[in-house]
Amino acid sequence: MQLIDTHVHINFDSFQADLEDVAQNWRDAGVVHLVHSCVEPSEFERTQALADRFPELSFAVGLHPLDVEKWTADSAAQILSFAMSDARVVAIGEIGLDFYKAENQDQQESVFLAQLAIARQLDRPVIIHCRDAAARMAELMRSFWANHGAVQAVMHCWSGTPEETQWFLDLGCYISFSGIVTFKNAKQVQESARGVPDDRLLIETDCPFLAPVPKRGERRNQPAYVRYVAEQLAQLRQVPLESIAAQTTANACRLFGLTLPEAGRLTLDDLTLEGQPALVTPS
């Protein structure tokens, strides 16, 4: 069974003392690839060095909405240059809107749109952070799609309502669930997770944040724990764990243009489980 953790931050200091052990943990858990998101362009070279160290790591470059005060006249050109300089850059991100206690909404929107334009220019997907901003996010994306063309996107660490989820599905987005979906009180997230179509579903840890049940008491999340997210989705959607693993891995390969050395590029034709189709459309 193969799993892909589509959102990690293993450059954080909390990983530096035992990163080789953490890597062995994710390999033992069946995690065959990871997508690392930068929260600001200054992380690019450090993340690139991690990809040199761990060949199963791809990455994204962008500016997080909580860091938009770091945007300068040179930022767009810098992100564009970084993205074009390394084939392992598979997305622009993470970018988006975070209106929780925010007083700079206009600035966030401007920086988000500028990075959408970079992704459109490069024909790369975007990794979107959206907190307390779903309605405005959907409005901006609809407008951008209408005026400039669609951009492939994933709504990462998704915690929205089923209605909000549908807004982004209608825009062609993938929906990625994190450890939040395992939390006892995350009922609306779990309901959203039941309804996402098979071919739009992704899994992630967003480590070192949001350790899933049964590891929630740990202060540091890690990529190996993405298996618990997959297990919860399998339970919610009433399908085998192997089906969730195969489907989300194929989806990640398709969105990010990944090829897995262990098995080659997965296609939907490959998704079978004991002779039966692994794709199960939730009712």
Image (cartoon, rainbow, N blue to C red):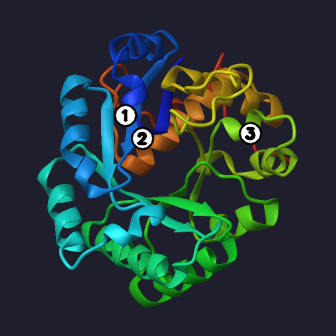
Tag in front: 2 or 3: 3
* Residue 11 x, y percent position in the rendering: 34, 34
Neighbour tally class for label 1: few under 14, some 14-19, many 20 plus, Cα within 10 Å: some
Q: What's the amino acid at mark 2?
A: Cys
Q: Quadrant of residue 227?
A: top right
Type of the residue with mark 1: Arg
Q: Which residue occupies the foreground of this view, 161 or 235?
A: 161
Could you tell me if the residues under marks 2 and 1 are in contact, i.e. CB atoms within 8 Å?
yes
Query: For numbered disc 3, what is the local secondary structure?
Result: helix
Of marks 2 and 1, the one in the foreground: 2
| Residue on which the image places disc 1 | 265
Q: Give the mark nearer the N terminus: 2 vs 1.
A: 2
Q: Residue at x 31, y 39 (%)?
A: 58
Residue 133 position within the rendered picture, expressed as x and y whole percent measured from the top left:
65, 71
Q: Is residue 276 visible?
A: no
- Could you give the CA–CA distance between mark 2 and mark 3, rounded to whole angstroms? 22 Å
| Residue 23 visible in the picture | yes
Relative placement, left or right, of 166 versus 52 is: right
141 to 55, vertically: above or below: below
Residue 137 appears left or right of 145? right
Label located before the other in sequence (1 or 3): 3
Q: Which residue is mark 3?
A: 181
Task: Give the number of the disc on residue 239.
Answer: none
Up/down of 256 relative to 264, above or below:
below
The crowding category of the residue bearing disc 3, from other C-alpha atoms within 10 Å (few below 14, some 14 to 19, many at least 20), is many
**Badge number at residue 253:** 2
Number of numbered discs: 3
Q: Nearer the viewer, mark 1 or mark 3?
A: 3
- Residue at x 24%, y 72% (from the top left corner): 76
- Work out how far the residue at label 1 is from the one at label 3, CA to CA, in angstroms: 28 Å
